[in-house]
Image (tube, helix red, strand yellow):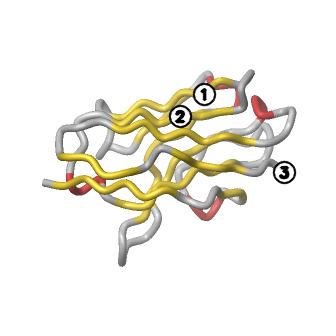
């Protein structure tokens, strides 16, 4: 099982950009589907973006499509989330997550067993 550590959160003005990174332990990182989720106070955790194992497929929520980009470097055991044109409604704690090796990419947070500690993203208006 991988262990995940996020970095890169912070405070940014609306319209700005942030880049989140997630570093994973283990030697078979490329076999894990990886996802980014977020949770704002009083709301349920929601899917933001994900990369299939191997990196051949990516998915995005409608709310971030065209603004966020997920990418992975299997040689460096990292997955990143580039966030552009940020809006105040993007404010949340962002989490990196992993599914079991070779599992399909899904959007329900209940089906992701491994999580990082989260990193705060705050977008001011």
* Residue at (77% x, 34% y) in the render: 29
Q: Which x, y percent locates residue 15?
A: 18, 39
Task: Give the Cα distance between marks 1 and 3.
Answer: 18 Å
Q: Residues within 10 Å of mark 3 (few under 14, many from 20)?
A: some
Task: Give the Cα distance between marks 2 and 3.
Answer: 19 Å
Q: Which x, y percent locates residue 18?
A: 36, 38
- Labels 2 & 1 near each other (Cβ < 8 A): yes
Residue beneath disc 2: 80
Residue beneath disc 1: 72
- Labels 2 & 3 near each other (Cβ < 8 A): no
In the rendered view, would you say 25 is above or below 38? above
* Residue at (55% x, 57% y) in the render: 108
Residue 22 occupies which quadrant of the picture? top right
Q: The residue tagged with tag 3: helix, strand or loop?
A: loop
Give the mark, 2 or 3, whose residue is nearer the N terminus. 3
Residue 75 occupies which quadrant of the picture? top right
Q: Which x, y percent locates residue 118?
A: 54, 59
Front residue of this view, candidates 3 and 33: 3
Give the mark, 2 or 1, whose residue is nearer the N terminus. 1
Image-based side of 124 in relation to 65, left or right: left
Image-based side of 3 in relation to 35, left or right: right
Q: Which x, y percent locates residue 123?
A: 25, 53
Image-based side of 27 in relation to 125, left or right: right
Nearer to us of marks 2 and 3 is: 2
Residue beneath disc 3: 1
Q: Residue at the far left: name it.
A: 125
């Amino acid at each position: 099982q991988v262990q995940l550590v996020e970095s890169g959160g912070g405070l940014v003005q609306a319209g700005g950009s942030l880049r989140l990174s997630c570093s994973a332990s283990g030697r078979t990182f490329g076999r894990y589907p990886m996802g980014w989720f977020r949770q704002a106070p009083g709301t349920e955790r929601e899917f933001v973006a994900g990369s299939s194992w191997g990196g051949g497929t990516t998915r995005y929520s409608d709310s971030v499509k065209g603004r966020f980009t997920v990418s992975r470097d299997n040689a460096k055991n990292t997955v990143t989330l580039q966030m552009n044109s940020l809006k105040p409604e993007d404010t949340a704690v962002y989490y990196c997550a992993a599914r079991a090796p070779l599992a399909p990419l899904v959007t329900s947070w209940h089906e992701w067993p491994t999580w990082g500690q989260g990193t705060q993203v705050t977008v001011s208006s």
